[in-house]
Amino acid sequence: MFKAIRNTYRLTKAGATLAWYGVGFVPDYVTLPAPLRILRADERESGAKRQARGERLAKAIRALGPTYIKLGQFLATRPDVVGPHLATALGSLRDRLPPFSVDKAHHEIEASFGKRWQDVFVEFGPPLAAASIAQVHKAAVRTPGGNTRAVAVKILRPDVERRFERDLESFYFAAHTAERFSPQMRRLRPVAAVDTLAQSVVLEMDLRLEAAAISEMADNIAKGGDVGFRVPRVDWERTSKRVLTLDWIDGIPLTNIEAIRAAGVDMEALGLTVIQSFLKHAIRDGFFHADMHQGNLFVDPRDGALIAVDFGIMGRLGPKEQRFLAEILYGFITRNYYRASEIHFEAGYVPANQSVAAFGQALRAIGEPIMGRPAEEISMARLLTQLFDNTEVFQMKMRPELLLLQKTMVVVEGVARSLDPKLNIWVAAEPVVREWLTSQLGPRAQIRDAVSNVNALASALRQAPDLIERGAKIVDALDPDKPRETSPRPSRWPIAVPLWLATGALVTIAAKLLFP
């Protein structure tokens, strides 16, 4: 009871702050009690009024503090919850906050490594950027040769964990309440949405996990033989839960287009790299940078390579989602809408009681207006947005990772187009998608899968005697008439024979499947 009162009080304060800023954000279809109807969004507003409301919402969220900033950024990935216009406004929300002092940063370093900060870094500068969870400093370390090397040091805000834990408790309370009393909200799965937000925050609260994400992406880039895209190297010796140390990046931020152009960088090639790198990471690796705005991207003027930083928000796609994304995009590229529809059903995103043909018709209505348009008017992100708008009509179950992908694609497209306004998204995507489909579904992939199945079968046969032995022991243990005193062990042949027969039957079935 006390927890409910406490969370109601916190949420009421937050609602009062939103109301103070004149923000309405709850969609029309959600039932609200009379006192809270001030939070209702008016979808009949003109474009200018909607933009102004989005700006007010961003200000209100900044006033509410770090957790609400993260919530706002997360809701930018859920246009199905807050509506497309507010999602767009929230998409531009950046968590720039006042920095904490250098003395507090020194204290965090000393607490993390158990030594004076001067024994960790030979130089340590003032904060360069401060966000809701952490801030960044430029520092220097001593190399084995006696020289110094510049590094970037990211440090968590003091007591940030306690603040987020308190606010997330209130978010869960609100989500459970919404699902309990609003059938419309139940379809949007707000509790699952808060779960995703909480998981993301937990990952951001441990900078060792961000370091691991950078290391994993570096391995993926190396395995894929990618050129033109890099990530900074992790200094593991100076990395802990609350402190992350990376190589310093001497590059031009993508926010400074004029400087990039003045450095003689090929803008068209750089725009292509932005799009293709993101698609490779998402489709090929199932692991992508989910915050690829201009402030997190730099270009090396020496070779024109793209360098990404700030890996606090990462997206993952399972094998099913990777295949779904690749085949959906290829279906639109080749205008095979029926196949694109089938993929939705095979992935389980559209219930089986819906019509494959009718959904294919809906996809055609999305894809055909795009075909034949000028390159600068083609948007893969807009296509995915329209696709997800069909969720209610066809009772689709949307997965948070796909919404995060869609949100990231909106940002990536914007970055690429800022470098090359005439970039053709479909032309850029086609070779990446085709290469993945060929590697995963082509003849070589089928041979590879067959070999893998044969190896699995061989492994099962090697384990068969052990399985029989364990099965006999289990049968003995479950036999209520079996005496428990020490006695000569009876023969296990009566149980072994049927187990061998069962194994033989499995082998026969597997052979039929592998070699029909």
Image (spheres, rainbow, N blue to C red):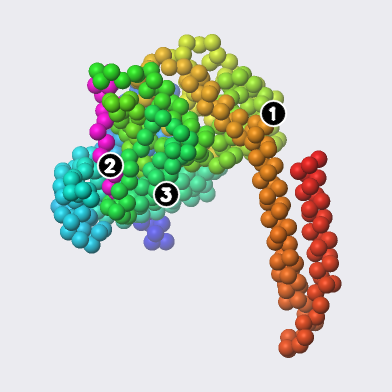
CA distance for labels 3 and 2: 29 Å
The residue labelled by disc 1 is: 356
> Disc 3 marks which residue?
198
Question: Residue 252: x percent and y percent?
Answer: 26, 28
Mark 3 neighbour density, 10 Å: few (under 14) some (14–19) many (20 or more): many
Residue at image mark 2: 247
Residue lying at 18% horizontally and 56% vertically, measured from the top left:
119
At mark 3, the secondary structure is helix
**Would residue 252 be counted in the magenta stretch?**
yes
Q: Earlier in the sequence, mark 3 or mark 2?
A: 3
Circle 2: is it few (<14), some (14-19), or many (20+) Cα within 10 Å?
some
Under mark 2, the amino acid is Asp
- Where does the image place residue 70, in percent across and percent down from the top left? 35, 42
> Does residue 452 appear to the left or right of 13 in the view shown?
right
Taking the image as drawn, is residue 112 in sight?
A: yes
Relative side of 411 to 261, left or right? right
**What's the residue at 42%, 22% (across, down)?**
272
Query: Mark 2 and mark 1: span between their CA atoms?
Result: 51 Å
Q: Is residue 485 left or right of residue 198?
A: right
User: Residue 14 occupies which quadrant of the picture?
Assistant: top left
Q: Residue 337 or 240: which is nearer the viewer?
A: 240
